[in-house]
Amino acid sequence: MSEEAKTRKLVVPGERLPDEVELKEPYVVEVEGARVATVMGVLDLHGEKPSFIPLQTVYVPKPGDVVIGMIQSIGVMNWQVDINSPYVAVLNAQDFLGRPYNPLTDDLSQYLNIGDYVKAKVVAFDRSRSPILTVQDKGLGKITEGKIVEIQAAKIPRVIGKKRSMISMLQEELGCDIFAAVNGRIHIKCADSERESILVLAIKMIEREAHTVGLTARVQEYIQELKKVKGVE
Amino acid sequence: MAKATDVKLIDEFGRRHDGRLPEEMRPVSMRINVLDNADGSALVEFGRTRVLAAVYGPREPVQRFMILPDRALLRVRYHMAPFSTAERKSPAPSRREIELSKVIREAFEDIILVKYFPRTAIDIFIEVLQADGGTRTAAVTAASLALANAGIPMKALVAGIAVGKIEGVLVLDVDEVEDGVGEADMPVAAAPDIGKITLFQLNGVLTKEEVEKGLDMALEAIKKLVELEKQTLVEEYVTTEEV
């Protein structure tokens, strides 16, 4: 067992955490004066201050989040977008088209149909109404190429890694464009389908083993092995 | 049919009809992640009692009128499969099942952090696959594991066990036979990590002292059950690699 592994501990719901662990509601809460974990997670005693990393989270939208949404249904003036959250988001037609929209002359399914993916930013969400999305920013809009990989939202930080170490390694090894959205969906764009399938397998491996130590190195090894097997340079 | 007085449920050595001592539980087994389509699931066995729990959510409730503006809606369905008992049980929800659904829901209302997910619903489906006494406490235990497996924030893990009285002796974890002829049955569920009792019922008559002693027995057993729940959850994550 490595030094780092000794300082990491699996924690179950209801377990007391050291008082120095920061509150992270609803995953670290205060119950009768004590810090308590409310989901499965890893207590990291490495570093200056102990921290708690939840292994399971529910994606709750925050204004400013860039998410990947899937069109769930089409309304009269808007699309209802599944953003992998308990809350279904709304994308207004006027916002998407960037011009006034008239439902009598225009058909929304021509622009975005059910099952299409969009990259969008959450502009407003106050828990009393549905989250509102916008695509009026650089790099946002309908996703027309590449693939979407869906993983648990809690594992996204691991796919990115400390100081982007994991995602940079993936990009270097396979030369793909990777965008990991906070709501657990990852948009990948690779030169060929071989690289794409290797990347999907690697992402799934990260999701499965997110709580283990030395993962970046193991994923790199795994990718190199797959590259050899599939004959990818 | 045998009358209560005809049946000897505790022998001269103080052993029960299945060989257990009064303070002994039936063999307990717990498994999680048993269903692919649920967000979280668990299968719990107390001897021959076998209960499956599936948890979904937080998710958008289909019936919009049920939405609560300040917290998540918790729904529990306790159901006994038609094949779970010796004689076929009608699959329609009975009065007893509706009551147990409510009691089990109340056992979790103060445990699940519903206030963080307003306007959503959390569903707990409990299916009794085989009934041999103590199904409600097994159901609470299975639901607690399934909730943890689904990643729904909760203050603590909950487990349940029943204490009964047969032939004047307090016994832990009563089964169907003991429940049928015993003098009292007292199911208890608690969250030992935060020191809270979340379910407490009593069917029959017990003295104040007996209730106190029975409660101590139940809480002691619940501590062990919660430890087993923790072990079950951790084992699911420990792969060949160290944590």
Image (spheres, rainbow, N blue to C red):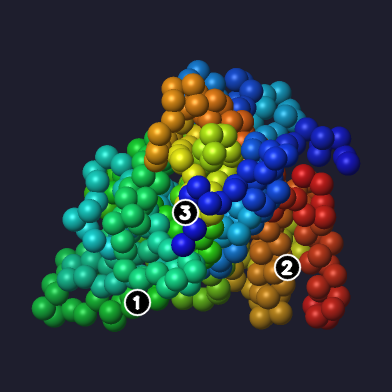
| Residue A159 in picture, x, y percent from top left | 64, 54
Count neighbours of disc 2 (C-alpha within 10 A) and say few if under 14, some if 14 to 19, many if 20 or more: many
Foreground: disc 3 or disc 1:
3
Q: Position of residue B41 (x, y in %)?
A: 54, 58
Q: Count the marks: how many? A: 3
* Mark 2 residue type: Leu
Using the image, tell me which numbered label, if any, was put on residue A174. 2
Q: Is residue B24 above or below residue A178?
A: above
Query: In the rendered image, which residue does mark 1 sit on?
Result: A114
Three-letter code, disc 1: Ile
Residue that appears at 24% across and 61% down: B63
- In the picture of the structure, the residue carrying the numbered disc 3 is B3
- Circle nearer the N terminus (2, 1): 1
Locate residue A26, reporting x and y percent: 46, 37
Instruction: Tell me whether circle 2 and circle 1 mark residues in contact (CB < 8 Å).
Output: no
Q: From the viewer's perspective, is A15 left or right of A88?
A: right
* Label 1 chain ID: A
Q: Pick the residue in front: B39 or A190.
A: B39
Query: Which residue is found at the position 22% from the left and 58% from the top?
Result: B64
Q: Nearer the viewer, residue B117 or A24?
A: B117
Q: Amino acid at mark 3?
A: Lys
Dot 1 crowding, Cα within 10 Å, few <14, some 14–19, many 20+: some
Look at discs 2 and 1 and give the one toward the viewer. 1
